Amino acid sequence: MSLYNTTYDVIVVGGGHAGSEAAAAAANMGAHTLLITMNLQNIAQMSCNPAMGGIAKGQIVREIDALGGYSGIVTDKTAIQFKMLNKSKGPAMWSPRAQSDRMQFAECWRNMLEQTENLDFYQDSVNGLIFEEDKIVGVKTALGLDIKAKTVIITAGTFLNGLIHIGEKTFGGGRAGEGASRGITEDLVAKGFEAGRMKTGTPPRVDGRSLDYSKMTEQPGDEITEKFSYLPTTKPLTKQRSCYLTYTNNEVHNLLREGFDRSPMFNGRIQSTGPRYCPSVEDKIDRFVTKDRHQIFVEPEGWNTVEIYVNGFSTSLPEDIQDRAIRAIPGFENVKFFRYGYAIEYDYFPPTQLTHSLETKLIKNLYFAGQINGTTGYEEAAAQGLMAGVNAALKVKNKDPFILKRNEAYIGVLIDDLITKGTEEPYRMFTSRAEYRTLLRQDNADLRLTEKSFELGLASKERLDRVKEKREKTALLINFLKETSVKKEDMNPILESKNLALVNQSMKLFKIAARPQLSFSDFKNLKVLESFISENNIDSEIIEQVEIHLKYSGYIEKEKNNADKLNRLENVRIPSGFNFQKVKSLSYEAREKLSKIQPTSISQASRISGVSPSDISVLLVHMGR
């Protein structure tokens, strides 16, 4: 089958995290898909730190897995360390994070994609788009091929007109050692799209053999490890590699300041906005002048490599300044560089130009996912890629788009934030962005999403069966706790060991277990419970679900009620193409913002900055409510 005479259902432009998930999702849903990338050796490469997950990001990876995506499985297969962050807080804040072997991660991704049916690959650079009026019908490549498609997903990462900065040196590129992509932005702007520029940076990579770890604090992984994927494809880690912690100091800061006049950040050569929550080391020193030290995380790049990622030292300062300053960090006195840190500027398209399906409003059948939408992070990109892949496949089948609401997934929060509020700086997900985070926990992503994904034809029957079993066994154990009484003679020794008030009569186990000071591990010698768990083959995942229900059911029900109220407004639809300018009772700002965003529901309209409660009341009247 020739590229010249094939019309693909879906073409995915770019093979990063967004592109890889998009290609996998579309192909697994039966769409004939082509993944075009500049270098097939770099599919799903970890351009920045060699880790997946973290606060809110770990929840996203679990949601991707629950939906049938690949990121969780690949992370589990290539992990070298696992941590569950925020375990001392409530379960809404628990966030899994794993260090990965960078080389194995990309290799595993490519192997999984190559084993995916309906997916073709082509190595070339896309430098143009083919339109028929307001519809995209294909792409142009650097080698001169015109490849036709019913839908196109652009996941170009930092490659769109990318510029790399190191001190006074500037050169084109989308990543160190790789060229930039040119032509796509220009074609889109010619079609009326608004484009902007953003910046991100990366720290130096160094030779771990040249570091003195005795001057640092070791940071091992969790003793009891977990995984990202709900499937039993891998087992939790038993062997791990440690990370290390050290700090900058005033000497480091003074040495870095010597290069500020040569820094592209401070001399005006970089004018675009960088990530607020992952600033460069020179930005941290400039903004937080009262702090006399900043954390430096020393992260291994894999099982066997000596390459080290210097997390916390992201910089675009001249290489001689980087070299001198880093040697003043304890443990780095004799460091050898593998490569210097750099900053990169690239084009993005304000995401208010998209619908909730990630299809563009201006051009039909064209989807954007990842950093092109102004986000930062592998996890945010992968989530958008999966959703764009799903919706492109649905579009080909003439089916309604798949939209996740804010109370259904962090992915829903991410996309709604982007298209409703937009972003003028690289967007990063946090738990604080989700108003229903008690519902959107990392432990229940499968319960929330897998049935939806199975109905799409994406999640496997195995996934669905596991979800059903998890739900049934959770209900079974909860019911047992509610019906089973425990004698005071059996319960009081447990309470006494915890210095808790004793009971003077038999009591239902549910009521005792709901006490915040107790956990299931405290009941390990309670024979009636242990025998029930053993007989019904109830594992730690089910116990965790039950324990969360016991402790937090009141909070969970309250959030569900609040979400139901929101969904009532979600069901009040605004007709497509509604002319807000004609509604003179709206404020001028509301008319302007509503006309630009074109919300599809009253709920979405209420989240737009500048739209007041009185504006929403006016809209409700106009919608017959």
Image: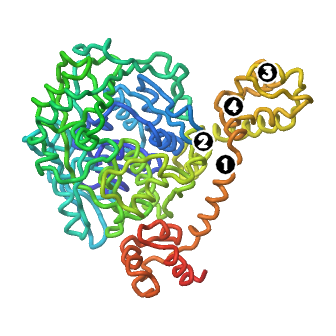
Observer able to see residue 110:
yes
Q: Mark 4–mark 2 contact, CB under 8 Å?
A: no
Q: Quadrant of the C terminus?
A: bottom right
At 28% from the left edge and 41% from the top edge, which residue is drawn?
A: 288
Task: Look at mark 4 in the image and give the residue it sits on.
Answer: 543
| Tag nearer the camera, 2 or 1 | 1
| Tag nearer the camera, 2 or 3 | 3
Q: Residues within 10 Å of mark 3 (few under 14, many from 20)?
A: few
Q: Mark 4–mark 3 contact, CB under 8 Å?
A: no
Q: Earlier in the sequence, mark 4 or mark 1?
A: 4
Q: Mark 4–mark 1 contact, CB under 8 Å?
A: no
Describe the element under mark 4 as helix, strand or loop. helix
Alpha-carbon distance for marks 2 and 3? 33 Å
Alpha-carbon distance for marks 2 and 1? 15 Å
Q: Earlier in the sequence, mark 3 or mark 1?
A: 3
Task: Look at mark 2 in the image and give the residue it sits on.
Answer: 444
Task: Look at mark 1 in the image and give the residue it sits on.
Answer: 555
At 36% from the left edge and 21% from the top edge, which residue is drawn?
A: 244
Of 567 and 366, which appears nearest the observer?
567
Considering every residue shown, the one lying at the far right of the view is: 505
Of 152 and 193, which appears nearest the observer?
193
- Which amino acid type corresponds to the residue marked 3 in the rendered image? Glu
Considering every residue shown, the one lying at the far front of the view is: 290
